[in-house]
Image: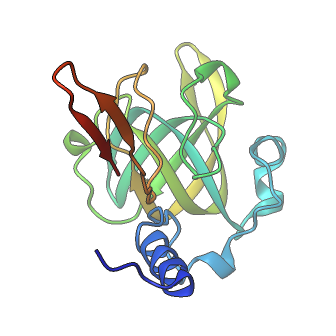
Amino acid sequence: MRVLPCNVSWLLAVVLIAGCAAQRVVPDELEPLVDRTITFEQIVAAPESYQGRVLILGGEVLKTKRLKDGTQIELLQLPLDKDERPMLNRQRSQGRFFALQQEFLDPATIAEGTKMTIVGEVSGAKTDYLDEVEYRYPVVIIKHLYTWQEQSQDYVRPRPGFSIGLFGGSGFGGRGGLGIGF
């Protein structure tokens, strides 16, 4: 067996790790436009103050409705984790918001409970009914929509990456056998 020099082994490991990096949720062309300093709480308090700002919001789909000029998605806001994935704990939500897709998006393709990360431009607020009470929804125009694959609440998503395992062992057999493995 031929052993690679140490520096070649490290270079190979770095290349493999880079190739297995996690998929980016925010497209490269939108990244410079995103304002990560604005919180959802600020948007709820004064959506008009942030009109035109691009931000990243996450949530769970509650309802989808076709409009004359697009599709409206009502989401329960959920904080995002470091991978920009909505967290599963609904009790951490700070409210609801509308995300507007300005082109046709069939509501039948978006199941209730779907987790989404949205890069959107704040366009103000819209008052609508939440059951029998008026509710003021912040509204964002969708620039990019990322739908997360459905997974069980108990499932822990593996982190993409590269691993190297070294295995070894030895044993003594009852018939005088000896084995060593790497």
Q: In the rendered view, tell whether residue 13 sits above or below residue 70.
A: below
Give the vertical position of 63 relative to 48 (above or below). Answer: above
Q: Residue at x 54, y 78 (%)?
A: 10
Looking at the image, the residue that sits furthest to the front is 176
Describe residue 25's horizontal placement relative to residue 172 as left or right.
right
Along the viewing direction, whichever of 140 and 180 lies nearer the viewer: 180
Viewer-closest of 178 and 22: 178
Measuring 67% from the left and 78% from the top, which residue is drawn there?
A: 33
Q: Position of residue 100 (x, y in %)?
A: 46, 55
Residue projecting furthest to the top: 132
Say which residue appears at 45% left-offset and 80% top-offset: 12
The N terminus, quarter of image: bottom left
Front in this rendered view, residue 181 or 81: 181
Side of 54 relative to 83 (left or right): right
Query: What is the residue that sits farthest to the left in this orientation?
Result: 175
**Residue 91 falls in which quadrant of the image?**
top right
Q: Is residue 2 above or below residue 50?
A: below
**Colouring scheme, one of rainbow, by chain, secondary structure, one colour:** rainbow
Q: Position of residue 175 (x, y in %)?
A: 16, 23
- x then y, percent, for residue 133: 62, 17
Q: How many marks?
A: 0
Q: Position of residue 66 (x, y in %)?
A: 30, 46
Say left or right for 59 vs 137.
Answer: left
